Every structure is written in C-alpha cells, then in structure tokens.
C-alpha cells in the first residue's frame, strides 16, 4: 500500500472536514493510503506542540510518496515560510500546500476576490443598502486582511462609509460572531457582512434571540457556504467555496508530482456568489440557476455513462463503466451535486438499461456493475456526510472521556484484566478498527526517542500478537511491515506525553469528524499508560516484600496503595503539591460538616498573586512556575496543618481556616508578611512574590454553603485589588 503524509492540525471545523473528505476520496480511488501527522500550532510556545514537531522530524520519509500540508492552518499564517522551511528541510518528497501560497512551492487556493466583490456589489447596486457593519476575521491571516480591504474598496466605489466603530475584529468562530453582533448592534447597521459563515451563524442566532427578523430588520451575509448553513431555516447569501473539491485537487496535484508530471502552481479554484434570502432576495432566484447548472452536469454524466456501458459490453475487462463513474464523481464533487441527486441519476440509468437489455447474460453483467456503482456511491456518502449529529455524538463521547470515572475505570481494567482486551474494547467503542501503541525504550532513566517496542496492535478490529522484546526503529519504520493495514486506510499518528515527558506514540484510524475526540483519546491513553507505569513500580515493590509476608496480603495492600495514589492524583495540583480546586471542595465539604456539628466558626481566605503576568512576560513561564511554588510554600508555612490549602487555579489560592475568627487575622497577617519577606530574600530574584486576599467567615456570610462563601471572599479580594490599583 502506497502512503501519503498529511501534515495537519486536526480540528472539527466544517472547512477542515470537507477538505479531508476530498483528499480521502481521491486517495481511495487511486490506491493511496493516508498517514496524518498531528502537528498542532507552529507558533505555539507549549511544550506539547514542540513534541509533535519532534515526532515529524523522526519519521523516515522514504516509506512515503508525498506530503500534503495544511501550512496556513498549522502556522496560523504568522510564520508560514518558517513552517514550510521546517517541512522541506527534513524531506525531498514532493509537497503541496493547501490554502496557502509560498514562493517556490506547489499550492492550491481559492479565488475569493471575484465572488466576494460580486456579493458586495449585489448589496450596494441591487438592494442599494448604505448602512454597513463588518465582522472581520483575524488580520494576521491573509484572508482576514484581504476581505477587510475588499469591503472597504467596494463600499468606497459607492461612496458608502465604513467607520472603524462599525468593524469588529474576531476569531472566525460562532462565539466570535455572537460577541461581535452584541457590540455592533449598538451602531444599528442595516447590513452585517461577516468574514465567514460561522461568524454569520453566531450573529444570526443572537439577532433572532433579540427578536429581529432576517432580512426585514437586519441583512446578514456570510462567506464559505459551509454545511452549517443547514442548521437554521433561513439560508445566508454567501460565497461558495468547494472545499471537498479543493482537497481532491490537492491530492491530484500531488499525484502528478509523484509521477513527475507537469503541474501549474498555484492552482486557483473559482468561487461563486450564492444569493439566498438573508440579503432580501427570493431564494428561488439563485436556486433556479443552480438547478439548471446541476442539471447540465447530470445530463453530461448520463451521456458519458451510456457510452461507457456500450464499451463495457464489447470489452468487459476494461471496466469502462466503473472508470467513467469514478471520473463523474470528481465532477459531482466539483459542482457540489447532492447525494440524493447522484442516487436519482443511478436509479434513472438503471431503469433505462433494464428496459434496453433483454438478454439474461447481459442483465446479469449489468446488475453486477450496478452493485459496484452503488458501493462507490455509499463510500462517497460515508466520506462526505459528516453531519451535525456526528459532531454532537463526538462531543458526548468527549465529555464521557473527560470524566473522572472514565480514566479510573480504564486504569482499573488495565491493572486487573488483560491489557490488550481492555484496549481493544476502548478503541472499538470509539470506532477504531486499526490501532497501534509504541512505547519508547528506557535507557538508564532516559527515553530513547528512536527505538521503542510495540505495546499494542489491533488490525481490522482484532488484536495482533506482538513480540514484547522486538525493537522498532522510528528512523526506519513506524510499524513492523507485517502488521501495516493491507487495504486502504486513513491513519493518524500522535505523540504520547504527560506534562513535558514523551514516552511513545499512537497510530489509529482517523476520520475527519472525530478530530476533537482523537485529541482527548490520545491524552486519556497517555495518562492511563503513565499511571500503569507507576503501578509497575509498585508491583516491583511487592516482589521485594514477598519474603516477609504472604504474596496475597501484600498484593492487596499494594492495590489499595495504587488506588489511593490515583485518587490523590485527581485532587492534588501537580505543580505545587497542594490540593487542586476539586480537592479543596471535596476535603472542605467534609471538614465543615464537623465544624458545623461542633458549632465552630470557620473562615475562607481567597488569595490572588500580584504581578504573575509580568513575571511570565518578562522572565518566562519557568520563572512564573517558581513564583507559584514559592507562593504555595508561604501559605504552607503560615497556616496550621489542620487548615486546608489549595491552588484554586492559575494564580489563585484558597485556604479553609477551622476554628478561626476575625480576631485571629492580625496574627495570620503577621505570619504571612514574615514568610513573604523570608521567601523573597531566599529567592533573591529581580521580582517580588506578593499577593492580595479577601476573607469571609461562615457566620458573617449568614451560614451559607462553602461555594457561596468562596464567592464572597472573592468579592472581598476584588475590593482589595481595586484599592491597590487606585
């Protein structure tokens, strides 16, 4: 099986999914499989993203034929050339960039200017609108700057003003559309032009929630014509970009480069103005034109299919009908012909052919061809129909995987049962038929990022027996050649890491509509396997104690220790060792029940570090971590062992003081000041550790619940911070 590498930032956006479906459709028809490398964001400072780049660097590219790179999405357009140089420096394979052009590279992009200008001229000339507002995307993105320049240019031609107050700079998301609408509605625009359909969707929902009618009260237009438009009753006037066809053409361009054929680059695909009701037009005006255009494509396909069938009857081995149908599917993708229209066409052709052929042998041959054509249609529909319900199911699955019970159950199953059966159930529950886990070798406490062992392998839903002592060299092959999937496959490779430690990688089936789920699946498996490593250490301790007590009793004790440790991990902050938010609330609720029974007062102190952002910005995040840990030590040294201290989140800390009253505050404050002075002297840094706090007692709150007392203490903190600023 021939493999292409896809350098990607997996996401669940409609744009991304449709492009990937187009790539998959072409690859499947041409005998290529896909290996997607999860690259994250190029300009991110997070260690986990740097780890993803390291994985790409280690892969031996000689096993692959070419690379398709989502350069613009990965680099977020701020460092496209830097990222492209990183990719090309590590391989001599042909590379195609999607939605981004760079000097000397092969690229495929959309002509967005023509259709967007047509949309703006339509609003100004046909409807004579004069009061505009604009929801802009990020200007660091070339498309964001281009669309802003374009609307200013066209409105200028009609001498229509677009003041800066009528522009909102957003993030291309539905939430950003909601936020932008709420700000711009104060300007009372007649027309709200949105940089993409997702922002338009957010503005639409917020406007209708405000009681506005579209387009009578407010005209809203979008850009992209994504499938999300189908989630509300009133379609947008927008610009149609054939994303599936873009992905298909990108794979086609790479295929030509692989075979050393001439390629024109950049290839610029046309876009089209789609006029619908949201601008004030009758929907049927544009729909009738679309139907005429689609009908012409279908009629042409019908003629080609009839000609191909005649050739097939004379030369059955030529597979002319199947080849012709695959070619027509490319045209259907290009013109966004619906699945139902394709099915109707095949049914119509089938009825026509059944009437024309009376010979039983020919009818049998025809039925065999029809079955194969139906299979191609079903495969295509399965690739293209990534619906809203699929995304909802994905989010439900993600919520399940994020829950504490998920990780605890998987860890317990892996510890107590056969690890391979447990992993098999886990992957199958997430619709993964192929899955492989490779763990790096450990050499004297350090990980060898080149060599590892195959920990788990599943092919076509069945666990494959592996040799635990068989080494895999990442610089030679990602997997043993005998277990690579033999049929078409679309696989995703992700790094396994906990905090900043890399300890392996995972490869499994990848589908466009499961991007977010894959990220949570990878993180959950990383945490689970790391916990198992802790379990192995504890088991080794069991063996050392076997001579002193019986094996059964010691095993039971160690299992209890493991479960206690796993529970402790869920309530402790890994950086400071203090309780985390969950630990504070859990332990606090338990403790205050005793205080209330004993009729004792208690207080909650809510603390916020002063100047942590400046420390991070000026001295780096490592210095910020040191400051947070120092703050934790100050609190530990200032309060009693019976008090509950927690890092509540970020630079916020909480303390539950039992049997305390406001008269104790002076003593507490004195201890805090002394310990702050001592820690700053010991650290001897160019910055100082300091904090502000608010306090609320149980009695002063009117004997409210713990969460409410925390909010009251937080309010007191807000007042203190405000006074400090003044």
Image: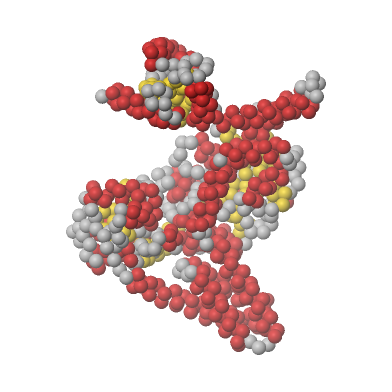
Q: Residue at x 44, y 40 (%)?
A: 43
Q: Quadrant of residue 649?
A: top left
Q: Which percent across, then down, holds residue 646?
A: 48, 25
410 and 86: which is toward the camera: 410
| 652 versus 56 height, above or below | above
| Placement of the N terminus among the 4 image quadrants | bottom right
Q: Residue at x 58, y 52 (%)?
A: 510
| Placement of the C terminus among the 4 image quadrants | top left
Is there any visible trace of residue 195 in the rendered image? no
| 48 versus 180 height, above or below | above
Is there any visible trace of residue 365 in the rendered image? yes
Q: Which percent across, then down, holds residue 708?
A: 41, 31
Q: Which percent across, then down, holds residue 264?
A: 46, 62
Q: Which percent across, then down, holds residue 677?
A: 40, 12
170 and 601: which is toward the camera: 601
Q: Residue furthest left?
A: 159
| 439 versus 642 height, above or below | below
Q: Quadrant of residue 715?
A: top left
- Report how many numbered discs are placed on residues in the image: 0
Compared across the picture, whether 487 is left or right of 594 comes to: right
Q: Residue at x 22, y 62 (%)?
A: 129
713 and 669: which is toward the camera: 713
Q: Residue at x 59, y 46 (%)?
A: 493
286 and 145: which is toward the camera: 286
């Amino acid at each position: 099986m021939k493999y292409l590498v896809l350098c990607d930032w997996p996401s669940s956006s409609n744009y991304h999914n449709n492009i990937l479906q187009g790539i998959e459709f072409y690859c499947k028809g041409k005998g290529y499989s896909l290996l997607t490398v999860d690259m994250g964001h190029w300009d991110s400072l997070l260690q986990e993203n740097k780890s993803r780049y390291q994985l790409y660097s280690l892969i031996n590219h000689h096993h692959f034929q070419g690379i398709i790179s989502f350069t613009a999405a990965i680099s977020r357009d701020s460092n496209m050339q830097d990222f492209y140089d990183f990719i090309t420096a590590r391989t001599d394979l042909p590379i195609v960039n999607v939605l981004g052009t760079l000097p000397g590279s092969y690229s495929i992009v959309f002509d967005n200017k023509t259709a967007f200008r047509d949309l703006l001229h339509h609003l100004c000339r046909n409807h004579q609108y004069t009061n505009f507002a604009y929801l802009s995307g990020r200007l660091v993105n070339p498309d964001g700057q281009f669309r802003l320049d374009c609307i200013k240019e066209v409105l200028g031609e009609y001498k229509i003003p677009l003041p800066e107050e009528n522009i909102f700079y957003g993030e291309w998301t539905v939430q950003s559309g909601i936020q932008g609408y709420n700000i711009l509605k104060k300007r009372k625009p007649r027309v709200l032009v949105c940089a993409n359909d997702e922002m338009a969707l957010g503005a639409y929902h917020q406007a209708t929630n405000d009681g506005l009618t579209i387009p009578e009260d407010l005209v809203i237009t979008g850009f992209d014509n994504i499938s999300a438009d189908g989630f509300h009753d009133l379609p947008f006037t927008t610009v149609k970009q054939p994303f599936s066809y873009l992905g298909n053409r990108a794979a086609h361009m790479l295929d030509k480069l692989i075979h050393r054929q001439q390629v024109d680059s950049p290839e610029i695909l046309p876009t089209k103005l789609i006029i619908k009701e949201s601008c004030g037009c009758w929907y049927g005006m544009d729909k009738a034109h679309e139907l005429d255009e689609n009908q012409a494509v279908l009629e042409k396909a019908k003629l080609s299919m009839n000609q191909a069938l005649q050739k097939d009857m004379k030369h059955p081995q030529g597979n002319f009908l199947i080849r012709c149908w695959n070619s027509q599917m490319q045209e259907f993708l290009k013109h966004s012909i619906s699945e139902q229209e394709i099915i109707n066409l095949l049914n119509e052709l089938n009825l026509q052919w059944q009437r024309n052929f009376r010979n039983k042998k020919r009818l049998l041959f025809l039925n065999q061809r029809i079955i194969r054509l139906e299979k191609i249609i079903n495969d295509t529909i399965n690739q293209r129909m990534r619906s809203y319900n699929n995304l909802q199911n994905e989010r439900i699955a993600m919520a399940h995987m994020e829950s504490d019970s998920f990780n605890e159950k998987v860890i317990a199953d892996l510890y107590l049962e056969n690890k391979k059966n447990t992993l098999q159930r886990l992957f199958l529950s997430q619709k993964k038929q192929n899955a492989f886990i490779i763990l790096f070798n450990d050499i004297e406490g350090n990980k060898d990022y080149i060599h590892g062992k195959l920990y788990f392998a599943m092919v076509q839903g069945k666990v494959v027996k592996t040799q635990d002592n068989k080494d895999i060299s990442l610089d030679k092959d990602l997997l043993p050649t005998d277990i690579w999937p033999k049929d078409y496959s679309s696989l995703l490779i992700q790094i396994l890491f906990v905090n900043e430690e890399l300890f392996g990688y995972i490869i499994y089936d990848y589908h466009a509509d499961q991007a977010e789920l894959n990220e949570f699946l990878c993180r959950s498996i990383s945490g689970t396997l790391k916990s198992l490593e802790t379990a192995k250490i504890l088991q080794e301790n069991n063996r050392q104690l076997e001579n002193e007590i019986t094996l059964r009793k010691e095993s039971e004790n160690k299992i209890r220790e493991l479960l206690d440790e796993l529970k402790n991990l869920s309530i402790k902050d890994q950086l400071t060792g203090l309780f985390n938010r969950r630990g504070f609330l859990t332990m606090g609720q338990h403790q205050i029940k005793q205080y209330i029974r004993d009729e004792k007062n208690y207080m909650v102190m809510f603390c916020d570090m002063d100047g942590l952002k400046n420390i991070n910005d000026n001295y780096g995040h490592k210095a910020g971590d040191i400051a947070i840990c120092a703050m934790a030590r100050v609190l530990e040294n200032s309060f009693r062992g019976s008090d509950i201290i927690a890092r509540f989140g970020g630079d916020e800390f909480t303390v539950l003081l039992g049997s305390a009253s406001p008269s104790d505050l002076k003593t507490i404050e004195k201890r805090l000041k002394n310990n702050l002075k001592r820690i700053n002297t010991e650290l001897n840094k160019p910055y100082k550790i300091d904090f502000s706090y608010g306090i609320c007692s149980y009695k002063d709150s009117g004997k409210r619940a713990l969460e409410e007392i925390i909010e009251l203490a937080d309010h007191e903190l807000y007042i203190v911070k405000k006074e400090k600023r003044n």
